Amino acid sequence: MNIPERIAALRQKMKECEFDAYIIPSSDPHQNEYLPAPYKTREFMSGFTGSAGTLLVTADKAGLWTDGRYFLQAEYQLKGSGITLFKMEEPGIPTLNAFLKSEFKAGAKIGMDGKVVSLQNYEAMQKELEGMELVTGRDLVGDVWKDRPEPVLSEAFILGNEYAGKSASQKIAEVRAGLAEKGADATLIGSCEDVCYLFNIRGNDIPCNPVLISYALIDKTRAVLFINEKQINGQVRSFLEKEGVTVAPYEAAFSEAEKLKGTVYIDSARTNVYVRSKIKARIVQGLNISSVMKASKNETELRNFDIAMEKDGAAMVKILKWIEDNVSAYAAGTANNPGISEYDVSTKLLEFRAEGKDFIEASFETISAYGPNAAIVHYAPAEQGSALLEPKGFLLLDSGGHYINGTTDITRTVPLGPLTAQEKESYTLVLQSHIRLALAQFKAGAAGLSLDTIARLPLWERGMDYNHGTGHGVGYLLPVHEGPQSISKRPINEALKLGMVTSNEPGYYAAGKYGIRIENLIVTVPAEKTRSGEFYRFKTITLCPIDTGPLVPGILSQKEIDWLNAYHEEVRTRLSPYLDEEHRLFLEEKTKKL
């Protein structure tokens, strides 16, 4: 079936259920950002492959709501589908709930699959759509999707204390202390990355996300892992038992939820409506205690992050040289050189990363975008038909890896040849924005919104901006996007705390022309204590040259140039031992002092 046929089949199911509308979020029972194949329901029904978005279908209309990262991609992928794109947070664009209120009156029946809708979103709908009936018991997409994939059941593996820095039993004790502070008797955790963090285990149930599809229950005496028991071998089971963890079947999480008494603490953003319906005990809501714990990396984790950055930086130097060599050879008309594509770059980079010790997998699908494609913020090249690199303009390369030592996320914008004056100025301003945030000193307790402003100012002063956040948290051998912190325009009141690893990735995108983004990972560290209080700053931990060729003289301040020179000196010193002579010479050239 094509997309219009799938929508038509869904409408027939809606008619049978007497639903006026049906909501399909980008979600699974654990509210993972990147979804297991069986839960890519919104993608199946719409054809839009971005990681964020919600599809709404009524008897005669269909709309997709997504954010600024995906506007261009969604416009392209929704062509001919009959689905209207609603650009979230753009002037005059209604939210999904506002659209429903404009379309329907009290008594309308709105259907959804409660197993993939978070309690937080459901409660917001209840409030905004008062008088409408929200029906959460039907998975209509499952009725339409006849060849739905089976879930992946990967084998769990142990993350030793030499990497985790803290035992599972210690973490469980901290959660219990947190429950006592909140006056709660138990917590049921649906966030897969929190479960894996707490019990010091990892898996590969979702590509690029080293997690296991699971639940955890912690109360005053028990710590239970609910998982398909085929995924737990004898070694892992023995390890968990020594840490005080009991293994139970995945489905047992729901019957155990029904038995809970006293007060149960849950994270409404990571608990689905179905699970909530099973809990009969009193409920207190808040951010998972474990989410706060894992956001601030301990000393062992941070030391390992540094090792991962060295391995990853070496791979990045190799890909930058490989790109330059192949584009130069193609430009010179060298025999037997048909040129390289965006896709070739992504596969070659994966090869270079795999050469590094203890590399596990990519941390997300590589964004290798040439020329106009780079203006599509989350563009990923296809094997067939991806653009050939020409000796001009920019290649935007956003990628990352999972190592046993940690997770990386890095973006470089690579000049391939002559650039326009506009491209050079945009590149210089994006780098200036990046350095401004890297140099920022801020008072303890400051949240991401104020820091986001620091990064955007150089662009704002020229009437420029970008439609994505400036920074997201990064997990330790866990999903590359991790909360609770965020550096963005969104009013998230979560302070940047010591030990948090966050991205620094301002950008600029000229639709149909080019895209620029420069990204390093930064960790929050102490700066100074004064009469005004305690102040923090950022330490940049990513190691890779930033190309200085496109820089327009006179824009960067001397302080910003000094930062870049010092950064390049550290990059050269720490990466050289990982490289052969040829690549060391290339690195020296790319890190020359300005």
Image: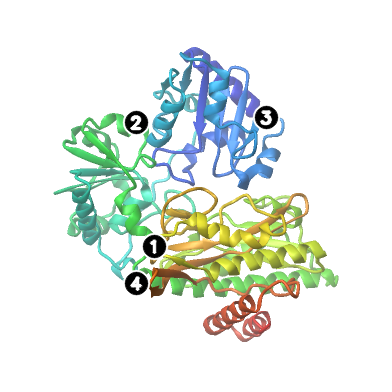
Whether pointer 3 and pointer 1 mark residues with C-beta atoms closer than 8 Å, the reply is no
User: Residue, x 42% and y 71% (percent of image)?
Assistant: 525
User: Residue, x 38% and y 59% (percent of image)?
Assistant: 295
**What is the distance, in whole Å, between disc 1 and disc 4 at their CAs?**
14 Å
Label 1 CA crowd tier, 10 Å (few <14, some 14–19, many 20+):
many
**What is the distance, in whole Å, between disc 3 and disc 1 at their CAs?**
45 Å
Q: Is residue 341 above or below residue 49?
A: below
Disc 4 versus disc 2: nearer the observer: 4
- The mark that comes first in sequence, 4 or 2, is 2
> Which type of secondary structure does the marked residue at label 2 adopt?
helix
**What is the distance, in whole Å, between disc 3 and disc 2 at their CAs?**
31 Å
User: Residue, x 62% and y 86% (percent of image)?
Assistant: 581
Task: Specify whether 389 is left or right of 226.
Answer: right
Task: Specify whether 49 is left or right of 338.
Answer: left
Which residue bears the numbered disc 1? Answer: 497
Depth check: 548 or 10 in front? 548
Task: Specify whether 303 is left or right of 556.
Answer: left
Label 4 CA crowd tier, 10 Å (few <14, some 14–19, many 20+):
some
**What is the distance, in whole Å, between disc 3 and disc 4 at their CAs?**
51 Å
Depth check: 579 or 173 in front? 173
Name of the residue lying farthest toward the right: 333
Label 2 CA crowd tier, 10 Å (few <14, some 14–19, many 20+):
some
Quarter occupied by residue 267: top left
> Which type of secondary structure does the marked residue at label 4 adopt?
helix
Under mark 4, the amino acid is Glu
Quarter occupied by residue 413: bottom right
> Which type of secondary structure does the marked residue at label 1 adopt?
loop
> Which type of secondary structure does the marked residue at label 3 adopt?
loop
Which residue bears the numbered disc 3? Answer: 81
In this picture the colour scheme is rainbow
